[in-house]
Image: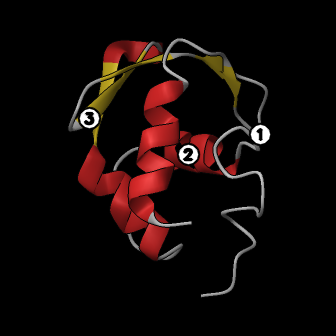
């Protein structure tokens, strides 16, 4: 999948509940260039999602939440973000 396809799926899941590996639940509002996460009203830019998508090692703000979203089978049903080959 391309990042564009991933970002479109992220947008389509606005308002859905996601759960981190630690069990914390959150939802987000989707904007064209960022998402606003309900926990602490954190904004995560689209560019951070793209950096994390391209490299699991890239340091980005919001990595735990980004990984939770990108790992979700509703976003990437074909593979796990964190286990993909670099």
Mark found first going from the N terminus, 3 or 1: 1
Inspect this view and state whether residue 16 appears.
Answer: yes
Q: Are marks 3 and 2 in contact (CB under 8 Å)?
A: no
For the residues labelled 1 and 2, the Cα–Cα distance comes to: 9 Å
Inspect this view and state whether residue 60 appears.
Answer: no
Mark found first going from the N terminus, 3 or 2: 3
Residue 31 x/y as whole percent: 26, 25
What kind of element bears circle 1?
loop
User: Crowding near pointer 3: few (<14 within 10 Å), some, many (20+)?
Assistant: some
State the residue position of label 2: 64
On screen, residue 39 versus residue 35, left or right, reads right
Image quadrant containing the C terminus: bottom right
The residue shown at (52%, 39%) is: 9
Q: How is the image coloured?
A: secondary structure
Farthest-out residue, left: 33
Find residue 21 and name its label. Answer: 1
State the residue position of label 3: 34
Residue 8 x/y as whole percent: 43, 41
């Amino acid at each position: 999948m391309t990042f564009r396809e991933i970002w479109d799926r992220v947008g389509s899941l606005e308002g859905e509940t996601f759960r981190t590996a630690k069990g914390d639940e959150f939802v987000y509002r989707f904007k064209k260039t960022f998402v606003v996460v309900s926990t602490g009203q954190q904004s995560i830019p689209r560019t951070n999602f793209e950096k994390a998508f391209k490299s699991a090692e890239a340091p980005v703000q919001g990595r735990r939440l980004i990984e939770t979203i990108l790992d979700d089978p509703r976003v990437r049903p074909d593979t796990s973000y964190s286990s993909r080959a670099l």
